[in-house]
Amino acid sequence: MIKVAIIGAGFMGGVHANAYSQMDSGKVKVMAICDKNQEAGEKFAQTYGCRYFNDFDAMINEIEIDLVDICLPTFLHEEYVIRAAQNKKNIFCEKPVTLDTAKLERMMAEVEKNDVMMMVGQVLRFWPEYVKAKELIEKKDLGEINYVFAARLSEHPKWSEWYCRPENSGGGVLDLHLHDIDFLCWLFGEVKSVYATGKQNKIGSWNFVSTILEFVNGVSATIQGVMEMTDGYPFTMDLKIAGTKKTYEYVMKAGNNLEEIGKSKRDAYLYENGIAHKLQIEEKDAYQLELEHFIDCLIQEKNSEIISMAEVRNVLYTIEAIKKSLETGCKVKVE
C-alpha cells in the first residue's frame, strides 16, 4: 500500500484526496494533510479521515509516508519538492511544476540525487477527450494535419490573491498556456520556435496571450490563454485539429472557474464528408486517472511512460521562449 501525505488543504488538495478515496483501498491511503491554516487543515482531516499537521518536518518524522503530494501555490513548489526529496519521499506535484527552469533544474537534481520518483500533474494527458485526439493522430484518422488550435479561457480569478500575482503563479502565460503546450508536445513532439503576442494587465501579468508554435516535425499550432475574460464568462477549454480527411473538435465550458468543472458542458465532434458526428466519450475523472497511474508506477517501481520529467522541462523552456517573444516582439527559437 502506498501511504500518501497531501501538502495543501485547498481546492486541489481536496480533488486529490477525493481521487485517492475512489481507488482500491488496498492500493493507497491518505495518511496526513499538512497545511499552515489550522481551520482548513482540521476540516480536511475530518473529511478524509487522516491526521492533520501544520509542520512538514513533524509530519515526516511522526508517520510513515511513501508519497508526498504537493498541492500548494506554484511559488512554494520548489521548497517542498526539495524537502520531500531530501527526506527520500516520492513526489507528485501539481502543475505548473514551478515558475522557471532554474528552479526546475534544482528540483530535478535533488530528485535524482536522492533516487526518488517524481511526476507532475499535466492532466490533459489523462483527459478522455484529449486522449481521444491523441488516438486519432496516432491512427492517422485525421489525415495530414493542416490546422491546430487550442485555447484556455477564464474570468479573472477571485478565489485566491496569490493566483493573481505573476511572481507567485506565473500568470496566464504559465498557468493556462502550459496545459495546451504540454498536450500538443505529447501529440507532435518538440517545439522548434514560438511567436507570441499579448497584453499585460496593470500589475504586469501576461493574461492575454496568443502564440504560434512551430514543431520540429513541421506542424504549426495556434494557442490562446486568457485569464481575464469578462466576469461571468465560463471556464473554457477548446481544441480543434483539422486534417486532410477529418476534423476533431472538443469544447468544454464549466462554471466561472475550474472548481465548477462538475457542472461542465463537454462536446466532442468529428467532422467528415460534410457530416458532424457527435462522439460519445465516457466521462472519467482525469485527476484520478493521473494519480492512479503514478500510484501504479510506484507499486511497480517503474517510471511513467505517459509523462517524463524531461518532457515537463521542455514545456517550461518553451514557456520561457514565449515570454521572451512577448517582451521582444520577435520569433524565438526554443533552446
Image (spheres, rainbow, N blue to C red):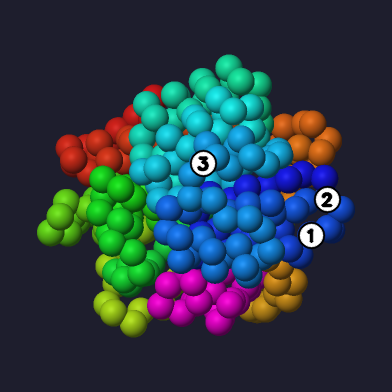
Q: Is residue 135 above or below residue 87?
A: below
Residue at x-position 50% and y-position 76%: 260
Q: CA distance from mark 3 to mark 2?
A: 24 Å
Residues marked 3 and 1 touching at CB (< 8 Å): no
Q: Are marks 2 and 1 in contact (CB under 8 Å)?
A: yes
Instruction: Give me the residue at 49% from left, 72% from top.
Output: 259
Residue 261 position, x and y percent, is 54, 74
Query: Earlier along the polypeptide chain: callout 3 or callout 1?
Result: 1
Closest to the observer, 275 or 9: 9
In the figure, is residue 202 to the left or right of 244?
left
Q: Which residue has dot 3 on it?
A: 56
- Specify whether residue 124 is in view: no
Magenta residues, start to end: 249-270
Q: How many marks?
A: 3
What amino acid is at disc 2? Lys
First in sequence: mark 3 or mark 2?
A: 2
**Residue 175 belongs to the span the image colors magenta:** no
Q: Nearer the viewer, mark 3 or mark 1?
A: 3
Tell me the amino acid under the disc marked 3.
Answer: Phe
Can you give x and y, in whole percent of width and height, for residue 68 in the image?
A: 61, 42
The residue type indicated by label 1 comes to Met
Q: Secondary structure at mark 2?
A: loop
Of residues 139 and 294, the one nearer the viewer is 294
**Residue 322 placed where, x, y %?**
31, 41
Q: Please state if 78 lies on the left or on the right of 333 as rendered.
A: right
Per the image, the residue denoted by label 2 is 27
Quote the CA–CA distance across marks 2 and 1.
Answer: 7 Å
- The residue pinned by badge 1 equals 23
